[in-house]
Image (cartoon, grey):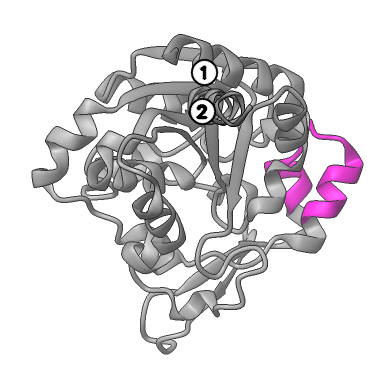
Amino acid sequence: MGEEVKMAETATAAASTRTPHFVLVHGIGGGAWCWYKIRTLMESSGYTVSCLDLTGAGIDPTDPNTVLTMDDYNKPLLDFLSTLPDDKQVILVGHSAGGLCVTQASGKFPGKIGVAVYVAATMLKHGLETDQDLKDGAPDLSGFGDVNDLTFGLGPDKPPTSAIIKQEFQRNIIYHMSPLEDSTLAAMLVKPGPLTALLTAKFPKEDDEGVESVRRVFIKTAQDRVVKPEQQDAMIARWAPVEVFTLDSDHSPFFSAPFLLCGLLVKVAASCG
């Protein structure tokens, strides 16, 4: 009887090892809460899902104006990956500015990432290193007018340390195809994001080998008003992923197209098997 129990435990452990584990990373101003629909759908289908709050985001109490480097901002993800067993791999999913977090993590922990998925995300091998990187990978909302609330945590003569889109503009820019209740929820939960940390995110070329060894997938959002379709196309052309999918959604497909986004993530997981 004892041997049977041991065999059952071994089989359960093996099944757990084989079950795809998704790690979902939010964009600037967001938090783990952004993924509530996707997490529900995926866990109901038997997948393991971890949703992280980056430093100063979600329920993390850190003042985003004190988060001045990418290392500080991305510490929760890097710490999470560092604690994974060496033989464990995850499917790492980043939304919007979360793509910078995914790329940095790929350079530091390439062996622990089975595939990196960029959802309307900044996908630049070396981060925001050049003016072209900023043009391709950073949102330009100037066409909407004065929509950002900026905080100058280092003083009025220094660059802004955090930013948030003013509440009255959020739905039109970020969630225009999403259910009203989701954009209402988001308006209650979105926080200022650490602008300094993101705009100074640059990744060393010595990490290139690790970054290049990680399989990348890009999910385009065709009606995006934040990371515009032409920006997504430019990043894809510059650093081609192995596969590109397109959703007819706004910048927040986890709200506006959750079933379709979930289906694509499941498809990615199946291709990893």
Q: Which residue is mark 1?
A: 269
Question: In the rendering, which numbered label is found on residue 160?
Answer: none
Magenta residue check for 100: no
In this orientation, which residue lies closer to the viewer: 177 or 255? Answer: 255
- 85 horizontally vs 161: left or right: left
The local crowd at label 2, few if under 14, some if 14 to 19, many if 20 or more residues have their Cα within 10 Å, is few
- Residue 139 x %, y %: 48, 46
**Amino acid type of the residue that numbered disc 1 sits on in the rendered structure:** Ala
Query: Rounded to the nearest whole Å, what is the CA distance between mark 2 and mark 1?
Result: 23 Å
- Front in this rendered view, residue 105 or 256: 105
Q: Quadrant of residue 40?
A: top right
Vertical placement of residue 222 versus 150, above or below: above
Place of residue 265 in the rendered image (x, y in percent of width and height, measured from the top left): 58, 21
What type is the residue that disc 2 sits on? Thr
Q: For the point 81% across and 62% down, which residue is it?
A: 188
Residue 169: image location, x then y, percent: 74, 53
- Give the SS element for disc 1: helix
**Percent x, y for residue 41?**
76, 28
Q: Is any atom of residue 257 visible in this view?
A: no
Query: Badges 2 and 1: C-beta atoms under 8 Å apart?
Result: no
Q: Which residues are magenta?
A: 170-186
Which mark identifies residue 10?
A: 2
Observer-nearest of 35 and 13: 13
Choose the circle earlier in sequence order: 2 or 1.
Answer: 2
Q: Quadrant of the N terminus?
A: top right
Residue 2 shown left or right of residue 55 in the figure: right
